[in-house]
Amino acid sequence: DRKRPLVIVTRKLPDVIETRMMELFETRLNLDDTPLTREHLLDAAAQADVLVPTVTDRIDAEVIAAAGPRLKLIANFGNGVDHIDLKAARERGISVTNTPGVLTEDTADMTMALILAVARRLTEGERLVRSGRWTGWGPTNMLGSRLGGKRLGIVGMGRIGQALARRARGFGLSIHYHNRRRVHPEIEAELDATYWESLDQMLARVDIVSINCPRTPATYHLLNARRLKLLKPSAIVVNTSRGEAIDEGTLAGMLQRREIAGAGLDVFEQEPDVDPKLLKLDNVVLLPHLGSATYESRVDMGEKVIVNVKTFVDGHPPPDRVITTEF
Ligand code: 8YV
């Protein structure tokens, strides 16, 4: 019988985090950093007292059913918990925690970077230079669109949405948002943000739309074909949340036909697969889920995981419990 609880970590984490975890807990690390096979994941669930997964581990009802009697905490390394069947976990009495707050600013930076990259044709220009086909400057070469004076529509005004709004104001964008509920009047005033109760009405009026909401049943294909058609043909779509918020196939078709001007996508419906139509388009910027990928964020996320696990194994409620009541 084990004395110390066994913590199983599914992916390679920053060294400083792994070292600290080894000091504090009986820890099984994944030194390879290849995602666990399904078999190994089921095995990990069967053996662990605490499982530390990431977005690449599908913790569905089958994995929860495979959990041994010891498993009491899933301490996710990441904010979004859409890859975890929260209902199944709750039914088995397994708590779930995440790492909110520490990746907000970096994800907002990346969202702003995507907006700039698409509007100013950054990666397209870079490809031109690298290809050796650049023939020199011209007054009408590769014209993008100015950000100043345009309208940004933020879908999901949580921490990341608000951090994006602060940045966007510095670039002269006016802030519009749709959210389940209106944010606090003080925040609205600080951001000079206009609330749209109707997502449809907002989509028809903005120049850039950024998806910053979590993936829940309610946000699946939030930008479906009908809503994508409401956008202006000059509109830019940016997504740093979850691919499933947008009907990717329809978006790709519309970008191809220039019914939407451009897109900056950091997340996709079937990662790491990307709709092949997107790969051929010049008016899109595609990133491999890098929103929170800074060294600092990863260390802060790891520290959050450690605090959650430590608090839990010491017998107290961990700080970042995911509230499951709405599922
Ligand atoms: C990570 C994220 O890439 O936190 C999230 O929801 O998408 C990113 O921070 C990933 O989830 C880590 O598991």
Image (cartoon, rainbow, N blue to C red):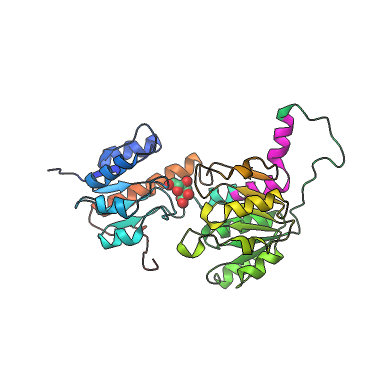
Relative to residue 220, is residue 136 depicted above or below?
Answer: above
Quarter of the image for residue 210 reads bottom right
Left or right for 252, reference 80: right
Q: Nearer the viewer, residue 302 or 189?
A: 302
Q: Nearer the viewer, residue 272 or 322?
A: 272
Residue name at image x 27 percent, y 43 percent: 44
Q: Write down the region rendered in magenta.
A: 111-129
Which quadrant would the N terminus be assigned to in this image? top left
| Residue 102 appears anywhere in the view | no
Q: In the displayed orientation, state which residue is furthest to the top.
A: 132
Residue name at image x 33 percent, y 62 percent: 87
Q: Position of residue 281 (x, y in %)?
A: 68, 42
| Residue 44 appears anywhere in the view | yes
Q: Position of residue 242 (x, y in %)?
A: 51, 53
Residue name at image x 48 percent, y 39 percent: 295
Left or right for 224, reference 262: left
In reply to whether residue 146 is colored magenta, the answer given is no
Q: Position of residue 229 (x, y in %)?
A: 67, 62
In reply to whether residue 123 is colored magenta, the answer given is yes
Relative to residue 322, is residue 130 depicted above or below?
Answer: above
